[in-house]
Every structure is written in structure tokens, then in C-alpha cells.
Image (tube, rainbow, N blue to C red):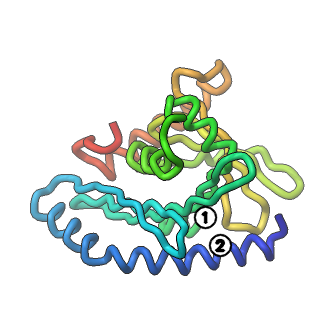
Amino acid sequence: MELSTTYYRLKSFFSIAEIISSRLAIQFDRACALAKKSGSNVYYSVLFYHDDMPYVCSIDVNAKFSQRMVYKISKTTDGFEVLTYHRESRTYFLFSGHFMQRYAERFDLQHLKSAEIVKHFADNNPVLVLSKKAERKKDKKIFTAMCNMGLMHCVQENGCNLITFDTILGHSQLNTGQLKKQTGLGKKFAHVSKVIYPQGNKAA
């Protein structure tokens, strides 16, 4: 996909994500107030439709942390893919059709609809960390990311703030080389999880 086409697609998604986020502004403010008052984590995810397209939006807040994530679900020739925007890093995340297929297979979710699979991913993977170690090629870099459910293979083209997640392996499915990557990322993942969720109720 050419960069110009990619950026047009991302810009369009960002505009829609802002619209959906604004619809949830009141709920988000209430969740923040409740989390601050109670000192505990407040999390929920909801399914939205915009122009007949499904979106999953998650609200995740506690006394130290808050985020809204909007996941756009798009059909592909062999299934569906998911696009979201990570505000903190100002980067778009694209979970490819192959990634979503493997996620459903490896965690026994094939019986669920696409929106339910995306909701499962959002609910079970609130923390995501990227490895700083990358294999650099002429026009892209290849690296690993870690979430609660496992390790993910990632690709980022040079000059593009889009990271494509190609596949995922559960922690129990890793080979020796992948276990080394898991160990390296595990400390960072544990630290980030502890900072964001000091009570451990969302990143366990």
C-alpha cells in the first residue's frame, strides 16, 4: 500500500475516532470521577456503529491513568482487520486479517463474531509494550511487542506512523528464541502494568 493511500486512510479513521470519542465524553468523565473517588480501576468497552461500520470503544481509567481506544473493524477478503490509534505514541496500530485469524484460533474464539473477538482483545490486553530492538531492512523495521495474551510480530515502514501487527503467539506457545524475547520484554511489561494498574486488577 502506498504511503499517500495509507495516510488518507489513517486521517479518515482519526476523524471518525474523534467523533466516537466525543459521543463517549460524558461516560468517560464519569468514569474518571468514579475512579478518582474510589481509587480503583474503572473499565468497560462498548460496540458502536458509524455509517454502518462496527467500532469497539474501550474506556479504561484509574486514579493515575486514563485512556480511550477506538477500534475500527473492516472486512477483508479472508476475514477482517482492525485499526486503532494510540494517542500516547501518536501511532496507528493495524491488526491484520492474519493477526485476527490467529488470535481467534489460538485463544479458541472462532465461534464469536468479529466485534466480539475485537472486544475480547480490548478487554484482555489493556497494556501493550513495544521492543526497542528491531531488525532493520531497507524500507522497514521488524520487531516484537508484548500484551497480556502473548507476543506479537510487528512491522513498521520507514517514515510512516503505522505499526502493522502480523500475528500473535500465546505465552505457552513460544519456542526458545521467542522465550528470550518474552523474558526481555517481560520486565518492561510488568513495570508498565504496575504503574498503570497499581492494584493489578486489569493487567493480571
Residue type at mark 1: give it.
Answer: Tyr
Please state which of residues 191 and 61 is positioned toward the viewer in this rendering. 61
**Residue drawn 49% across and 50% down?**
118
For residue 4, side relative to residue 84 (left or right): right
Secondary structure found at label 1: strand
Q: Which mark is residue 52?
A: none
**Residue drawn 48% across and 52% down?**
115
Instruction: Kindly check if marks 2 and 1 are in contact, taking CB atoms under 8 A apart as contact.
Output: yes
How far from the left and from the top, in percent, is residue 69?
Answer: 44, 63
How far from the left and from the top, in percent, is residue 95?
Answer: 62, 51
Residue bearing mark 1: 92
Q: Is residue 153 above or below residue 183?
A: below
Q: Is residue 162 above or below residue 143?
A: below
Q: Residue furthest top?
A: 176
Residue bearing mark 2: 10
Q: Is residue 114 above or below residue 190?
A: below
Please state which of residues 106 and 173 is positioned toward the viewer in this rendering. 106
Residue type at mark 2: give it.
Answer: Leu
Quick one: label 2 or label 1, which is nearer the N terminus?
2
Crowding at dot 2, Cα within 10 Å, few <14 / some 14-19 / many 20+, comes out as many
Q: Residue furthest left?
A: 37
**Residue drawn 67% across and 24% down?**
177
For residue 194, side relative to residue 118 (left or right): left
How far from the left and from the top, in percent, is residue 109?
Answer: 50, 35
